[in-house]
Amino acid sequence: MVQFDPMTLGRIFPLLLIVSFSGCNDADGEAVSKVIVHKQIRSPSTVSGYGNPRQIAAPFRFAFEESSVELCSSSTTPETPSCLHNSQQCWLEFDYNANKDMGAITKQHFIAEEGTYWIEGVGRVATSNNGFGHLNAYECQVEMTKVSRFFKISS
């Protein structure tokens, strides 16, 4: 006769539940590229440590699991979007007003294609050792509060 320690069953049961409810989902590449940028998991406003609003004019990279803006120590333009010296990649989020601005500019509620875009407006920057964005890979986050200009500059 086999006897199980009650503690062993207590440890195995949750694992069996996890395994039984887990599964794989095949992602459709076309559907993934139409990720709604405006939907946020958590409100950036709840993140402490945001600085004062400032003008943002920078390249914005949108791709699968990426929504980042490159903040430069020197000025950039849509014609020369690369930073020449110090730059910092930050996760990019949009607040309610910036979402409305994006909807008016793009005439839709999502960014349809991956690529590099130019974005201008007003935003606030937060930094954290805990990270932001996908897999907490970014040390800073920009919350756009107003978007005045947005267009694609490359694929």
Image (cartoon, rainbow, N blue to C red):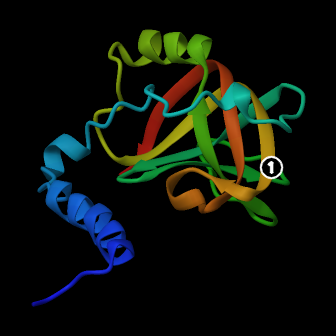
Q: Quadrant of residue 12?
A: bottom left
Element marked by disc 1: strand
97 or 155, nearer to the observer:
97
Q: Which residue is mark 1?
A: 127
Q: Quadrant of residue 42?
A: top right
Q: Is residue 144 above or below residue 89?
A: above
23 or 108, nearer to the observer:
23
Q: Measuring from the top left, give residue 3's x and y in whole percent.
A: 20, 85
Residue at the outermost bottom position: 1
Q: Measuring from the top left, give residue 85's x and y in whole percent.
A: 80, 66
Residue at the outermost right position: 52
Q: Is residue 147 above or below residue 8?
A: above
How many marks are shown on the rendered structure?
Answer: 1
9 or 37, nearer to the observer:
9
Q: Measuring from the top left, give residue 25's x and y in whole percent.
A: 14, 54
Q: Quadrant of residue 57?
A: top right
Q: Residue at x 58, y 34 (%)?
A: 93
Q: Is residue 155 above or below residue 42?
A: below
Q: Residue at x 35, y 18 (%)?
A: 109
Give the class, few, some or many, for how many residues have Cα within 10 Å of label 1's Cα (few <14, many ≥20).
Answer: some
| Residue 24 seen by the camera | no
28 or 5, nearer to the observer:
5
Q: Residue at x 56, y 50 (%)?
A: 133
Which residue type does callout 1 highlight? Thr
| Residue 28 seen by the camera | yes
Name the image quarter holding the N terminus.
bottom left
Q: Measuring from the top left, give residue 29's x and y in whole percent.
A: 16, 52
Q: Residue at x 23, y 58 (%)?
A: 17
